[in-house]
Image: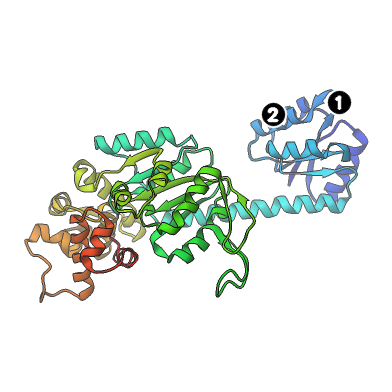
Amino acid sequence: MNILLIDDDQSLRKSIRLALETMNHRVTEAASGAQAQDVLGRSLFDVAFLDLKLGQEKGLDVLLSLLRLAPGLAVIVITAYATIETAVEAMRRGAFDFLPKPFTPDELRRVLDRVVQIRRLQSHVEELEEQVRSIVPEADLQTNDAAMRQALDIAFRAAPTEATILLRGESGTGKGVLARAIHARSQRAGAPFITVNCPSLSAELLESELFGHVRGAFTGAVHDTEGKVAAAEGGTLFLDEIGDLPLGLQPKLLRLLQEKRYERVGETRTRVCDVRILAATNRDLQTAVARGTFREDLLYRLNVIEIVLPPLRQRQNDILPLAEHLLQFFAKQTGKPDCTLTAEARAVLIKYPWPGNVRELRNAIERGVILASGPEVGPADLPAQVGASFSGSVTELGGQVTLDQLEAEHIRRVLANAATMEDAAGLLGIDPSTLYRKRKRHGL
């Protein structure tokens, strides 16, 4: 590695340099902060060793100057035992690590090995993120719709704050996508974004997933488990479908919002967390409050800033731009870069009511690109219920359709007409958690 050694003690610089060169690193010396900045402005370095006692200069000021010049530089501060607190403060300001004096060549080697390991991990994470981007289309938050523009404007103005935000809208309108965009524009962007799907588990298992549990707390708890609140420490906790949160868990979530305190299942020790809460629902929570299935005080705590996402059928001017964005992604992914939509397919996409919203549009475009026999995607390549708005045919009992297709179409139409998820589940004769799983399986 290219290493910059900053110390006003010439004899110490010489001994450190010899040790580093024995390890096959390239070393450049600087006796002051000003000299170090001059060198750093002309050359690239992987690591800098910085003595916090540089004559009359303040090491912490030099540290900030180095990081401004080279944000990716791994700065390892060197300090006497009496100034370890200062070294810790330096790490808070961006230093990679510190070495207390006196140190040995082995300690030098170990700290440099950590630099290499962290760089490899960062490279691996970047590679994985690139793989994810190649599999999942990048969220397109461009819009021509006034209501959607207003929703995005409120979201992005609130993003840098610590305010709790409640996202409302039908299933598939992009609440999860917007939650991630808010996190990315917040002061917590470098920390975790953790999602909890509230209707996916029973109340007992959901509490464990949210807060964690200790060994022996319940049957099958064979070891301690940190929950998603702990996993989101310093970042954002996104509670999806918050309207389906079991009533018994709501007081514990209210306490988390108010006091940032919680206990793991089976444990009496109170823990403190630093997380920002975002929540989303497709239900009318005021109605749920009136029915007694949702706490009014919890609603007020969640609803500091409410953002309503309009359904896709009300965003007519956005349908084709979104479809084109998705088409380009899936065409590239499937090796069909010249793929286009026919005029008939465009007409179908605009005419169809999209009860599954943007999620359904994504699935329809992916299917169309995969099944298209040539460079054009036509109505016949789209899902049957979408193409029906062009051909005039409908999915009906006794037709050439599978039971899965019938179930998917029936659930889609019920969801389009029901006021809430609970109403839809009641009409279908199933509980909300079963409806959640079926929607997930059918991509609704």
Residue at 25%, 52% in the rendered image: 357
N-term-proximal mark, 2 vs 1? 1
Side of 324 relative to 302 (left or right): left
Q: CA distance from mark 2 to mark 1?
A: 17 Å
Q: Residue furthest top?
A: 56
To which residue does mark 1 refer? 55
230 lies above or below 140: below
Side of 218 relative to 302 (left or right): right
Q: Secondary structure beneath disc 1?
A: loop
Measured from the top left, where is residue 255 in percent x and y?
A: 51, 48
Judging depth in this view, the residue of 271 and 372 nearest the camera is 271
Measured from the top left, where is residue 337 in percent x and y?
A: 31, 54
Occupied quadrant, residue 244: bottom left
Kindly identify the amino acid type of the residue bearing the numbered disc 2.
Ser
Measured from the top left, where is residue 222 in percent x and y?
A: 61, 73
- Other-residue count near label 2 (Cα within 10 Å), few / some / many at <14 / 14–19 / ≥20: some
Residue at 35%, 33% in the rendered image: 153
Judging depth in this view, the residue of 52 and 227 nearest the camera is 227
Quadrant location, the C terminus: bottom left
Judging depth in this view, the residue of 207 and 69 nearest the camera is 207
Residue 49 appears in the picture as rendered: no
Q: Secondary structure beneath disc 2?
A: helix
56 lies above or below 173: above
Side of 292 relative to 182 (left or right): left
Residue at 20%, 58% in the rendered image: 377
Q: Dots 2 and 1: beta carbons under 8 Å?
A: no
Kindly identify the amino acid type of the residue bearing the numbered disc 1.
Gly
Residue at 37%, 49% in the rendered image: 280
368 lies above or below 54: below
Measured from the top left, where is residue 100 in percent x and y?
A: 85, 43
To which residue does mark 2 refer? 65
